[in-house]
Image (cartoon, rainbow, N blue to C red):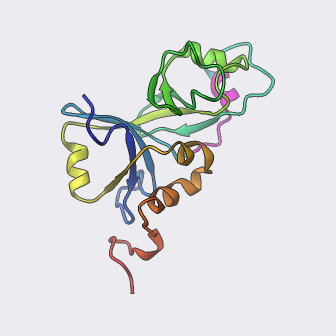
Amino acid sequence: MTSQLAPGLLVAAPGMGCPFFDHTVVLLVEHGEEGALGFVINRPTEQPVTSLMEGLEIDDLAEEIDGEVWIGGPVAPDTGWVLFDPTSGDTEDVDALRIEPRVAVSASRLFLEQIAEGGGPERYAVLLGYAGWGPDQLDDELREGAWIPIDVDPKIIFDLPPEQRWTAALATLGIDPARFGRLGVAEA
């Protein structure tokens, strides 16, 4: 079951107290009575995709693989997902959840192997872990003002550098984080 929040983006409110989620943008995939699931989209790692695939013992690596590895969230960091633009390459037969026409996610190892061989999408990132909330947990955090929901925007996900995504997401609502103090109150 999904809600009006999912699919969508959750933007950490200025002044959020949680160190992991401070200044994050989460692609919210599911939200319902049993909880919520999403992926952080602005926490890149220094790990190259080729190193990750070698660690998974995926052979036949293409000479050049340009994808990025991101921290998808603090839950199950040993799990992997591929966030991709299904309109940007060969993704027709991929077992994936299409979130919107230009945003999809897959947990398929076969898809990773396709990417390793030089196929697959042109625009993608491998996500390690995910963001998860138990029943009513995200709803409570929303009521407390920790998150600001906005619509999914593929431009924020794929076109901007990770360090600009949080500010750009807030800007879609006319929010300038520089005008907020640590507690989220406008400073004089």
Q: Is residue 183 above or below residue 59?
A: below
x and y, in percent, of residue 139 in the image: 21, 47
- For this orientation, the residue located farthest to the bottom is 188
Q: Residue at x 51, y 17 (%)?
A: 108
Q: Is residue 108 above or below residue 183?
A: above
In this view, the residue in front, 170 or 163, is 170
Which residues, given as a range, are shown in magenta?
Answer: 44-54
User: Would residue 80 be visible to someone looking at this image?
Assistant: no
In this view, the residue in front, 93 or 111, is 93
Q: Residue at x 39, y 75 (%)?
A: 181
The answer to whether 139 appears left or right of 51 in the picture is left
In this view, the residue in front, 124 or 99, is 99
Residue 20 forms part of the magenta stretch: no
- For this orientation, the residue located farthest to the right is 63
Q: Residue at x 25, y 45 (%)?
A: 138
Residue 46 forms part of the magenta stretch: yes
x and y, in percent, of residue 18 in the image: 36, 56
